[in-house]
Amino acid sequence: MTAVLATWLGLLVVTRARQVAGAPVFGLLCLLLVAWSVAIIIQRVGAETAVHPPVNLVEDAAAFLLPPVTTHIAVSVALEGRRSSIATAVLVIGYLLALGAIAQAAMDPAHPIQFGEPNFAPLGIPGSAVAWAFAGARLGVWAAGVGFLLHALSGAGTDRARGRQLLVAILTVVLGVAGGMLRILPEEVGGPRWVGVSLVAAAMVLATYAVVAQHVFLAAEVAGRAVRWSLVAGLGVVAYVGILVLLEEAAHELLGIDFPLVTALAVVVTLALFDPVADRLREISAGSSRSASTARLRKALGAGSLLAEPGTELRPALERLVRTFELTGAEVSFDQGPRARTGAVDESDALALRLPILDGEEVTGTALFGRKRNGLSFTSTDVDALELAVAYLRASVRLTQRHTEQAVALDALRAEGAAVRDRGSALREILAEASSPAAGLRVHALGSLRAELDGETVRSWGGAKAGSRQAEAIFAFLFDRGDRGASKDEIVELVWPDVDLDRADVAFHRTMLGLRSVLRPGRRTRGAGAPIAFTNDRYRLDPAVIAWSDVAEFDELLVRAAGAPEDEAIRLLEQARALYRGDYLDDCPFYGDSVHVEARRTELRGRYVDLLEELGARYTTRGDRTAASGALRQAQALAND
């Protein structure tokens, strides 16, 4: 049963979803299961014992590769964005372990890695110990795959469809792991071998359910058509072959010929009539002429998930966007078409994002994205990505409606189908980029100093061997100075004013080294490429270290708002308002209370007051007195401080 299901399911996924992440690896997994199952069958029932050794090597090779390949699929299903370094390391270790075991089995078949003797015992290590260690390593690789799936399940949130997919995937992998481990353990520990083989077969049944019913790798409509056609075509092929066998036997008996005349003619007839017969069967199964036209259209364009009924793909797409950008919710509605919503969206929230759905110059709907869960405003990159997503959804729905209304216009729709697929590819690339932590340092300086490096909060600025407060002060100094930089004397006078010169010099260099190692861990901290450069007797922070800062974003939003239309300007000003958490570098050790920061702090506070006054004026023009008075009162309070 495992061999039959793996053959059918592997070909089903590879031929219909080869562009989906993880589908080719799933095909490899099915191939390994087929090889493993067939090898076991041959060794159990085959009478030719001479083929048993090479067949046993095939069984071992497939069994050794199953843990890393299973984990590879688990990683592909769990991670919607770029694969993490941890996942890559697990896969590399798993594949190297499998290849090493295959090499040992091929070179020394008389001493396999097994618990009973004779077994592989290198360097005097007991063979049973080697077998236990190998079994534990394989279980570790499998467990890593389950861990990635569990982590993805915990982050699925309100996306129930994604949660069901991950849950079924977890159950499938756990069942397969249990079967695989029981298959290799001693019988006194794992029980009879047929128990493990049966669990693997049950896991294959559950994998079939995951692909067909929970739509892992295949869209619902594609999976439904594939199952129907597989059953119909399978039964038809069985009947066709049976008729040929009977006719061949009758020809042999009646005509007395020994060559396969009927089969040869049948092959020629099949090749000539396959396409028209298949088309006719599709028309019959479609029913109405409109459904038949839609079926012909699907064949011409290469049917995919976008050819479902209007709106069926909107909710999954919104759920993916909400997960990727960590939003409270999203809603999309078309004036004359479907509507979809996921999560909670507050239309009055200043940090929400409203985008029009355009068809050329005409507004055909609205997309509303709730605020980010971390409370930050949307960046320009986020807005660009969501605009592309809205354009993709609009094109998807429009294309679906045109398929329904103009099924006979195949030539015109083919070009639009290609454009939608291109937009989908571009969107997937941007979503993969957005779902991965941004590389570099993200600095929040409007208020207390806070920074994240590669997605992790910087908690110890000086590393393991330097003071964190002193290193934080040096970073703030260099961050504020920018291209002007700072001399060692200026820094020492700020951070170590009461320490004698020699001790201050040692502390300075130790702290600078620690700060450099934190800003660019694992890389050189001096010379070209260093995060803090020393030129012309001054230290300067490399601009490439800063991936994003709220100060730069604040300035950019104000510039963009200056030339934007009324509604867009208010949205940009509110985003800038949300960035300003307090006085510039407030409470920063040493530097926050120094005279060096006062000029820039006063300037930014003044710009914030101007922002509030501008908001008050614009809200007054709009007629929103409550919002206007709130902004103006806040501006007056800051101006009086």
Image (spheres, rainbow, N blue to C red):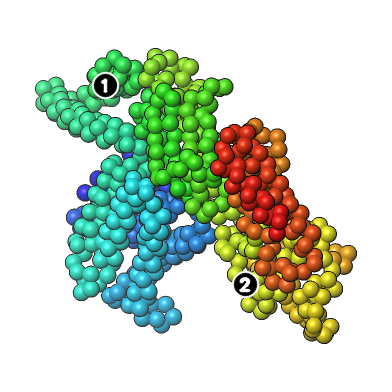
Q: On screen, 368 above or below 493?
A: above
Chain-order first, disc 1 or disc 2:
1
Q: Is residue 637 left or right of residue 106?
A: right
Q: Is residue 225 left or right of residue 188?
A: right
Give the labeled residue for mark 1.
286
Image quadrant of residue 107? bottom left
- Asked whether disc 1 touches disc 2, contact meaning CB atoms under 8 Å apart, the reply is no
> How many numbered discs sit on the rendered protein?
2
At a point 76% along the width and 65% down the height, the residue shown is: 477
Instruction: Residue 460: give its label.
Output: 2
Neighbour class for label 2 at 10 Å: few (<14), some, many (≥20)? some
Choose between 590 and 161: the one closer to the eye. Answer: 590
SS class, disc 1: helix
Query: Relative to 322, is 493 above or below?
Result: below
Q: Amino acid at mark 1?
A: Ala
Is the residue 338 above or below the residue 471 in the image? above
Disc on res. 552? none
In this view, the mark in front (1 or 2) = 2
| Residue type at tag 2 | Ser
Q: Residue at x 53, y 22 (%)?
A: 362
Can residue 53 be seen in this snapshot? no
Residue 156 placed where, x, y %?
39, 52
Rounded to the nearest angstrom, the CA distance separating label 1 from label 2 is 66 Å
Where in the figure is residue 325, as x and y percent of width and height? 50, 48
